[in-house]
Amino acid sequence: MTQQSSYRLAKQFAVKRIELCSALTVGGLTPSIGLIEECAKIGGVEIHAMIRHLEGGFVYSANDIETMKKDISNVSKAGGHGVVFGCLTPANEINLEQNKQLFSHAKSLGLEVTFHRAFDFCLDHKSTLDTLIEIGFDRLLTSGQEPTAIEGKETIRHLVLQSQWQD
């Protein structure tokens, strides 16, 4: 099944939004601008594009951040509704400065922002969630720090309760 036909199925089943990415075998990478544009032409489902141009982790250089900002701009121009990213330190903690840079850039373009499964590599999920809420992320993509969301359902439940307490 192609990514575009998956998008059509999402529309058929009244899915509100999808996370569009390429290279799922490596955890997902930024999709092509052409794919985003083609999905946007179909319409009816919000497109939230993965912003991750390199496989192999979530630690980025200053040059990587500039590339990611360009990708965010291109997602906006191509008709995307949001972006999905996450930047960590080598110690698997939130890279506050990098996430704030990307977050601010995306918000300046009117995009929603999701912190992705880099969260599942963080050591302290409670303080990490507090930090993401403080930054202003719209949502969190997690499997509860387990291989699958079913296995992580108790952690996810606690995260939901924690986020509701923050509102």
Image: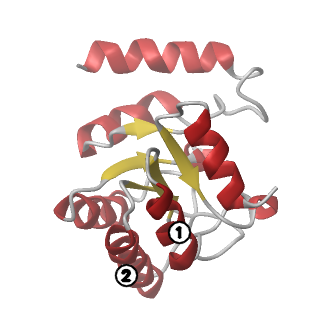
Give percent across and percent down for residue 34: 54, 78
Q: CA distance from mark 1 to mark 2?
A: 19 Å
Look at the image and tell me whether residue 85 can be seen: no
Q: Quadrant of the N terminus?
A: bottom right
Q: Secondary structure at mark 1?
A: helix
Residue 138, relative to residue 102: is it above or below?
Answer: above
Give percent across and percent down for residue 125: 52, 32
Give the foreground label among 1 and 2. Answer: 1
Residue 30, relative to residue 45: is it above or below?
Answer: below
Look at the image and tell me whether residue 101 can be seen: yes
Relative horizontal placement of residue 140, taking residue 103 as reference (left or right): right
Give percent across and percent down for residue 124: 53, 34
Give percent across and percent down for residue 41: 45, 63
Residue 146, relative to residue 7: is it above or below?
Answer: above
At horizontal 35% and vertical 76% (from top left) the residue drawn is: 69
Relative horizontal placement of residue 78, taking residue 12 as reference (left or right): left
Residue, disc 2: 70
The disc, 1 or 2, on the residue closer to the chain's N-terminal end is 1
At horizontal 34% and vertical 57% (from top left) the residue drawn is: 96
Relative horizontal placement of residue 50, taking residue 4 as reference (left or right): left
Q: How is the image coloured?
A: secondary structure
Q: For the residue marked with disc 2, what is the amino acid?
A: Lys
Question: Of 162 and 29, which appears nearest the observer?
Answer: 29
Q: For the residue marked with disc 1, what is the amino acid?
A: Glu
Task: Specify the label residue 38 is tagged with.
Answer: 1
CB under 8 Å between callouts 1 and 2?
Answer: no
